[in-house]
Amino acid sequence: MSVPEKRKDLGVPVVLPFMRMDGAECYYLDDFMPTPDNMVSGKSSGLYLRYYTFRSATYKTWEQERVMLAFFSRDNRCWSLFEEYSTSRL
């Protein structure tokens, strides 16, 4: 059984900065995050939420993967990472 090659039709993957998944860490995302392929934002109770999706990204040990990062904020400026997902590109 052979392993399928990764798709190359999405070009060069976006290189995402390393971020810690820790509520005490604060990131000013608007200052440094690459533009995502999709972003969903909203508010739940007293928290602002942002979900960034990249179709092809390199993040931590993931290479050319579909990556979704989720952040929360109390002031809509300083964001903390609370979820990170990757799906292999086939």
Image (cartoon, rainbow, N blue to C red):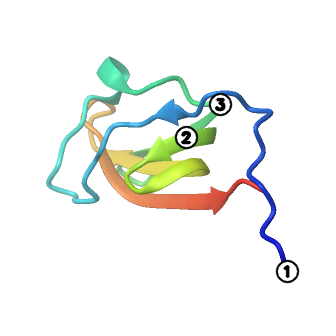
Q: Which mark is residue 57?
A: 2
- Determine the secondary structure under disc 2: strand
Tell me which amino acid carries mark 3: Asp
Residue at image point 55% right, 40% down = 57
Q: Is residue 2 left or right of residue 39?
A: right
Quick check: 10 above or below 59? above
Q: Position of residue 18 (x, y in %)?
A: 30, 44
- Please provide percent x and percent y for residue 67: 56, 49
Q: Nearer the viewer, residue 45 or 66?
A: 66
Q: Between marks 2 and 3, how big is the CA–CA gap?
A: 10 Å
Image depth: mark 2 or mark 3 in front: 2
Q: Is residue 86 above or below residue 19?
A: below
Classify the position of the C terminus by image quarter.
Answer: bottom right
| Alpha-carbon span between mark 1 and mark 2 | 27 Å
In this picture, residue 13 sits left or right of residue 33? right
Mark 1 Cα within 10 Å, few/some/many (few <14, many 20+)? Answer: few
Residue 66 position, x and y percent, is: 63, 49
Above or below 65: residue 22: below
In the rendered image, which residue does mark 3 sit on? 37
Q: Residues within 10 Å of mark 3 (few under 14, many from 20)?
A: few
Find residue 52 and report its horizontal and vertical position in percent. Answer: 54, 40
